[in-house]
Image: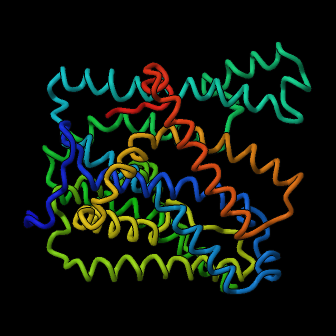
Amino acid sequence: MSNTKNTPISTSDRERVFYYDLARTIAIISVSCNHAVSRSFEVHQNPLTEYSKISVGLSFVKSILWIFSRIGVPLFLMISGSLLLDRNYEDKSVLKRFIKHNWKGLLLTTEIWLFIMFWYMQLMDNSILKSEGFGHAAIGCIETMLFINQTTMPSMWYMSMILFLYLTIPIIAIAVKKIDKRYLLALSIAVTVCAMVVPNINEFLQACGVNHTFDLAFEYENIFSYYLVYVLAGFWISKGALVRFKTFGLAFGFAAFFVGTSLFQLFLMSSNSNYFVRYADIGIVLSSVCLYELLRRKASAVISLKKPVTFISVSAFGIYFLHICVMTALNKVMDKFISTQYLSRFLILEIVSFLVSVLVIFITSKVGIIKKYLYMMKT
């Protein structure tokens, strides 16, 4: 196991682990950056046109911001693995508590925000309410809350994913204790190769104009979701899986993987490829793993920021739900009244939506029911 200087830092009477809070803070900033980047630069259709309009330097900044914005979800999942896979779910009381306090609480908060976001979106042009009336809107709201034909913010895909993924946590937790780690590691490597490495190679070949690609007969979905790779990685890292690696080597690895993936994205933007790096990319896995271990070891370097970091950490779910509503409204206002784009637009969207969300949560979380059910804040 790790030596003293690599031991997690516990804070408060409830034994908060500071590196979890720091990782969660970085993660929510990353997620909000993802939504700001996609509203400030072209990341969906024909990025080559935008690449030809702006400087290579700005395109590289765009790539860096995009890659950073892809690290947030992996960090959240690794934190979940660290916290949830070390429980004894064979004890029925532990399993019952997990379902009641973790999964059902997550489902309830998701349903509340699906309701809020649906009616929030009805204020916009061409909404169901404005085009078809209240009756159709009411049916649309019910369908949305039943996860059918949803009308909600695109970012809510994460909740649909995590709700199902969480249901597998007890099964995986038992497996990591009962089965040789090498077996699960082999499965994780197989998923990583099928879902990430081979598709990355194919995208690179296509961007280079090579017609040949590798079409695997194996499908990773027949093993498990690639998101579970991050959950398992977080658990193994929290158990000291990377302690044999020197901190300098991890820092160098993180920088190399992060910059390398950014350059890969820059190359794709300069080609005819419309591909943008996803969570299922090997560079994101390697960067996230190195960063998580570095945070585990070196969180004490910023312990002076404990108070704001802890508040943002416990507010992370609230920020996740709220910032996209603020950003959507701000984006529409900017379309009408503020002529700005690219980096300046990104900074306005990111900073304003994040700070407004934090301020709203700081004020409204003083109401217990809002704090518990709207933001899932646990302190």
User: Considering the image in quadrants, where does the C terminus appear?
Assistant: top left
| Residue 175 in the image: above or below residue 75 | above
Q: Position of residue 246 (x, y in %)?
A: 19, 79
The image quadrant of residue 254 is: bottom left
The residue under the point 73% across, 25% down is 119
Of the pair 8 and 48, the residue shown nearer to us: 8
The coloring applied to the image is rainbow
Q: Let me know if residue 229 appears in the view.
A: no
The image quadrant of residue 89 is: top left
Of the pair 91 and 339, the residue shown nearer to us: 339
Q: Position of residue 188 (x, y in %)?
A: 33, 58
The residue under the point 18% across, 41% down is 15
The residue under the point 38% across, 28% down is 103
Q: Position of residue 185 (x, y in %)?
A: 25, 60
341 to the left or right of 27: right
Of the pair 154 and 378, the residue shown nearer to us: 378
The residue under the point 47% across, 29% down is 365
User: Considering the image in quadrants, where does the N terminus appear?
Assistant: bottom left
In the image, farthest residue toward the top: 135
Q: Let me know if residue 43 appears in the view.
A: yes
